[in-house]
Structure formats: structure tokens, C-alpha cells
Amino acid sequence: MRRIVFTGFRGTGKTDVGRIVAGRMNVPFIDTDALIESTTGRSIPDIFHEDGEERFRAVERQVIAGLPLQDAVIATGGGVVTDPANMENLRRESTMVLLIADIDTIEQRLNRKPRPPLTGLPLREEIATMLDRRRQHYYAAADFCIDTSETTPSQAADRILQVLEGGTNTEKDRQTAAAFFRTGRLNPLALQTLEAILLGKDRDPLTRILGVVGYPAAHSKSPALFNALFRKYGLACHYTFFEDPELDEIMQVARQVGAKGLSVTIPFKKDVIQYLDEVEEHAAAQIGAVNTVVFACGTAIGYNTDWLGVRKPLAHLRGAKAVLLGAGGGAAAAAFAMVDLGMDVTILNRTPAKAQAMAEKFGCRWGRWEDLDGITPDVIVNATPLGMSPDDKSPLRDDQLHEGMTVYDLVYTPPETPLIQQARRRGCTAIMGTEMFVTQAREQFYLFFGIDVPQETVRELVV
């Protein structure tokens, strides 16, 4: 069996429930807090009081790294999920179960078993603050989610054992999902693999499915990248294509298979928002487009990591005079990133009204496509599909590119687009769309699993 790892805020029942599950499975039970105390010969309150939280987290990290990989049930401390190194060690060859409870229940339980304070706030405010602060981390740590608010530890253990034995979706749902995937453009081997996961006699009910949502989506490198990362980090997950012209059907199937997460590409980055329960406020809500969906505890949350993929390669050009080509979902993320870098941005689009609307939203200039001739920018970012098959042509003329200019083409299939080849011929600094893909995919993986993959690792797997 894979290790079973319990995470969740203090007071959700990790130790009590974990001990029962371990007993029923006849495997060892390990409580990391108890292991820290036995390793140091000191109580956790003493470590917090005398050495501070930072020292406690360092000891906790060492203990997590030394946990055995063999069959075991492990209960972790409430803050363990905030450290990517812990997540990498805990997720390997493991199924992670997040225990949750409402604030009233947690407060009552903590009043019975006082713990070291995490803030200077009153207990109830502290609970609410820390739950909000850690929520993204908890969701990344959740393969499955169990609410213990109104259950005894024994009842919660019963539910967990049911999930571990049979998963969370019905055979009818899996049959419906399999029929959907048969209508797509999966190659025979990929379809065979997916059908075995969904319907095979020896299927593992704990395997989580993720995928890229788009129409078309077959050009995406995400399945190859993510499946390679799953193998590298020992995750029981499979990444596939959710390709269909109807987003409504895609999202329905994603829920039927109990998807862990989705990458969203054209043309659905804006439309997908209506299918979500929440949208992350900082970037996704301001951009008005989502490229990442995380499912956890019955909630679908949308994020945007595209803007980070634009910002990082251009960070050294802060304040530059820039032109952004396009006014779609990808362009919105680019505009957000470029404005964040203090660039003087002009948005150009074949439909000027769309350029104007986006420019007014982000405080940029705007114009018609042909207005590029009178601008002479330092930076040009292409956020149109031009250059991606079947529109395999450059969006610009040779004379619009000048030596010393930086040209960033967000199209990454093919890696060397006509615009990239053209920019190099003209003496420009050319940034390929693979840079955006690498950065945004790395951020997606962190949102999905809480693991911080090195940039070079992702780049090597993409190439």
C-alpha cells in the first residue's frame, strides 16, 4: 500500500483518526509531533517558547525527511504543509488525506486541549486567520478531504477507509467519463491507459486525474511534462487531454472523475470562470482569465499563472516602452505582468475596440494593429495565436523589427515560431514561448501539489 498521510489544522482529529485507521489497516502509526518531542527530548510548547517557531519548523523538516517510506499511517502538524520540502517528502508514494472542521468545532476542541498560540490574536480569530493563510497549502496537500465537524473519530475513520478502498466516484460516472474521452483525439495508447485507470479490473481508486482543457488542446506539452513530474515525485496521478468544443461538458466530466486540477488554455480562459466557486483575487480576478483550476473539498478555485510566465523573462526590462499584440485571455495576463513591471504599454489588436477595453482596464495605451509602425518599442510581446499551426505565420513584417529590440512570442508550439526566427534574423533578443510555459507550469504544479519544482527541472523535461 501507499503511505496514508493526514494533514489539516490543529483540532481536526489527525492523531485520533489516524491511530484508528492504522489499527484497522494493521500498519504502524506515526505522529510527527510526538516524534519531534521524542527526538528532541522536549515538548513542542517548550520548543516554541524557548526557541521560537522558526527553530521548531527546522526540526519538523528534519523529522519529515526521515520518515519511512514503507506502509504506515502518518499524522502531521498543522503547519507542515506550508513548507515545499515537507510536501515533497510527504507526497512521495503516499495518499494524502486532509481533515477539515468548522471554526466552532475547532475552537471547542482546542479549548479542551490547549496548544501553543500561533499569533497574538484571541483563539477564534487566530483559527480564522491561520485557516485563511494556509488554505491554499491545505488544498494542495489534499488528495481526499474529510470533514470531521460532526463525526466521532471512529466514524471519520470509517469514511476514510471507504475512500481508500473505493475512491470517491461511481462506476456510472467513470463510464460516462470514459465515453467522453473516446470522442476526443487521444491516441490509442493514451486512451488505453486512461480507460485502465477509470474502468480497469485492477484499477487503483486512489489515482487522481488532471488535464489540460482546450479546443484544440492536442498541441499542449502539459501531459508529457506533468506525467514525467508525477513519476519523478512518486505521485499517483495521471494527466490527460480534456479536449471538446463544449466547456460545460468538460467541467462536468472533470467533476465526475474527481479531477485534482486542470490547466486551461484557449479558448476557455475567460469562460471557465462561470464554472468556478472562487477566483483568486490578486491576479486571476484582475486579469479576468483563469489558466489553473484546483479542486479540493468540493470547491473549484481558479488561478492565473500565465502572468508570472510573462513577467519573469522580462523582469530585467522594467520601465521599458512596450507593445502587446492581442487582446484575449493570454494578452490580459501579459498586460497585467507588463504593467506590474512599470512598462509603458500600448495594446494593439485587429479589433481596436477590444484593445481599447483592455487598455482602459489596465491603464495602458491602445491602438490599431498598423499603429505599430509609429511606436518603435523596446519590447514586443505576441499574445495572439499567430505562429501556432495552422496559422503558422509571423504577425509582423521584417521592417517592424529592429536590432536591440526584445521580442517575446507567447506561442510555444512550435518552440521556434516564425516570429522568433524573424526576430533573430533582424538582430533582436528573442524569448521563446517555452519560457512562459516552463514558468507557468511550475507554478501550476505548486498549486496542485505544494511541491516547488526547480525551474531547470521543468525546462529539461519540456525540451
Image (tube, rainbow, N blue to C red):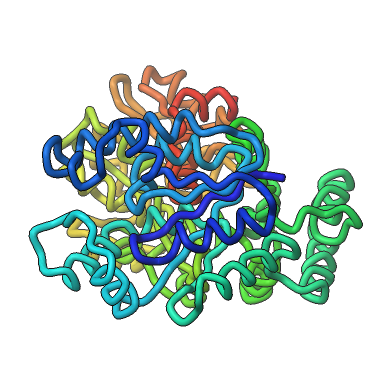
Left or right position of 123 against 185:
left
Q: What x and y, as percent, mark residue 305? A: 40, 49
Quarter of the image with the N terminus in it: top right
Considering depth in this image, is 208 or 151 the residue closer to the camera?
Answer: 151
Q: Where is residue 234 shown, x and y percent of the image? A: 63, 36
The reply, left or right, for residue 347 in relation to residue 456 is left
Front residue of 277 and 164: 164
Q: In this orientation, which residue lies closer to the viewer: 456 or 163?
A: 163
From the viewer's perspective, tell me whether residue 110 is left or right of residue 75: left
Q: Residue shown at 47%/77% (left/top)?
A: 274
- In the displayed structure, 366 sits above or below 128; it is above
Residue positioned 45% across, 41% down in the render = 87
For the C terminus, the quadrant is top right
Q: Is residue 397 visible?
A: no
**How many marks do you count on the picture?**
0
Horizontal and vertical percent position of residue 313: 34, 31
Residue found at x 66% / y 34%: 231
Which residue is at a point 32% across and 72% down the rendered structure image?
109
Q: Nearer the viewer, residue 140 or 320?
A: 140
- Tell me where residue 375 sits by quadrant: top left
Residue 60 visible: yes
Task: Tell me if residue 191 comes above or below residue 9 in the rendering.
Answer: above
The percent position of residue 89, horizontal first and vertical second, equals 49, 35
